[in-house]
Image (cartoon, rainbow, N blue to C red):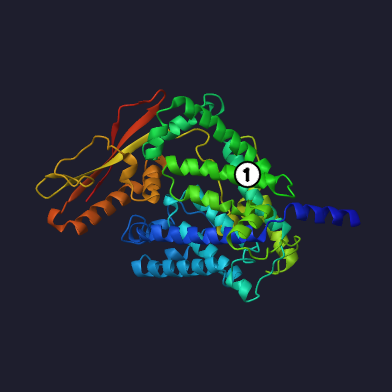
Amino acid sequence: MYRLKKIAVRVSRYYALDLRALSLLRIGIALIVIADLIIRASDLKAHYTDEGIWQTKFIYTFGWKQGFWSFHALSGSTSFELMLFALHGLFALSLLLGYKTKWSTVLVWLFTVSLHNRNVFILQAGDDVLRLILFLGIFLPWNACYSIDTKRNQVNTKQNTIANLAYLLLLASVYFFTAILKTSPEWRSEGTAVYYALSLEQLRLPVGDWLYQFPNVLKILTHLVFYIELLLPFLILFPSKKGYLRLTAFLLILVLHIGIGFTLYVGLFFVISMVSALGLLPKFVLDKVEKFLLKPKTLRTNAAKPLSFGEGFGVRLLCIIVIILSITINLSSTTWFQYELKKQFQIPINALRLNQYWGMFSPEIMKKDGWLVYYGIDEQGRQWDLRTNKDYVDFSKPAHIVSMYKTDRWRKLAENMANESFTFLHPMYGKYMLDTWNKEHPEKKLVTLNMYYMEKINLPDYKTSEPVKKLYCVSQ
């Protein structure tokens, strides 16, 4: 018994996280939530109200899973959504400042789940990471530093080793499963994956335009990305008392996602990925940073013990269940793991929004690319191009397809509309575009909108197929 206790203490020391790193994680996540809300609020009417694309009457028909819930879906009015956004932002500010942090975390997580469920067709992998980090934050002492709670002596600096492991396993899972799901030759042997990723003009940014000119470099980068993703889980999870391995993992994550963020239009995904790794920062790094910036007395991490938030055994048990479910969900995404969770497990998983799939650019890079054309017709039968605002419709490829999208949410929606499984989005999108145009341009009122998608396929050796004109919908 004594030996087991000794082993448990040693393990808890290996997997203790610096309290300042966890507090920086809290601050970073809160800032991301606030930034995300500001970006989403710029299209609040379009994406979250009955005046927009995704009306409340459609929510439970398409994309909804048993166990999902959303108080954002209780009303389709703009004022109701504004109220929820304001409350969400207020709770995120409270989390940022570290005021009543545990309950602020719970509320921000609840509002984030509700918001994500309101419109699932504009979500991306970064949203899953954000949502899961917020959930695990409920069990992490990330208010131990840089918080109002600290000033008020309302913090518990004790750690829960199981919660720490759940956080580390989440980070490791993102990179492990995205690597093993990359099974195509373009990742494993050809080394053409980065070439195909940068061939997607709906994603490629100016730095990507420059990098795209060097095929040999793209091949090296493909193998580098793949093997970094394979290496990261080992660096994150291997017991590291001093923290050198986790620091290496943090730096590699930083380099990997800075590269993604500068070359591909992925919204906040790359920022979320970098911020989510802040908890890996080891004590010796933060000691040096604090000494350089503030020269305060360093707050030492405590040995891992149960949290005071809830009963110790209950919290540990819940964390263990979450770990088991998350690993099973991820394993189920592979072809070689045959077991699937029974339906009775799916409801609580969906309710807590533990859903996760880390198949970014897996098993191969998407080859389908293209751009939307809005062919408007007025009462006299005259044509009008809603994109260029000209009296003739231009079907030719824009100089920069990626510039057509106001935010990554619109780009993700367009990507989903190109998927044959989501054709039901076409008439909703077309009707919204027509109504919005007529409200903003009453002097040029249109009666019909023919929405086309000019689809092209990216091929090897910097070639593409001839664009094919596809009629998405006719809206009136």
99 up-or-down from 237: above or below: below
- Residue drawn at x 28%, y 37% as measured from the top left: 399
- Residue drawn at x 62%, y 54% as measured from the top left: 279
Of all residues, the one furthest to the right in this rendering is: 2
Give the camera-side residue of 130 and 346: 130
Residue 278 horizontal/vertical position (percent): 59, 53
Residue 103 horizontal/vertical position (percent): 58, 70
Question: In screen coordinates, is 252 left or right of 385?
Answer: right
Sort mark 1 into few (<14), some (14-19) or many (20+) by Cα contacts within 10 Å: many
- Please, what is the three-letter code of the amino acid marked with disc 1? Ala
* Mark 1 element type: helix
**Res 69 seen here:** no
Residue 7 horizontal/vertical position (percent): 84, 52
| Quadrant of res 143 | bottom right
Residue 183 horizontal/vertical position (percent): 56, 31
| Quadrant of res 50 | bottom left
- Residue drawn at x 33%, y 47% as measured from the top left: 405
Question: In screen coordinates, is 432 left or right of 457?
Answer: left
Question: In screen coordinates, is 76 left or right of 182?
Answer: left
25 up-or-down from 384: above or below: below
**Res 305 seen here:** yes
Of all residues, the one furthest to the left in this rendering is: 380
- Which residue is labeled 1 in the image? 249
Give the camera-side residue of 119 and 192: 192
Name the quadrant of the N terminus. bottom right
228 up-or-down from 192: above or below: below
- Residue drawn at x 67%, y 65% as measured from the top left: 297
Question: How many callouts does the rendering have?
Answer: 1
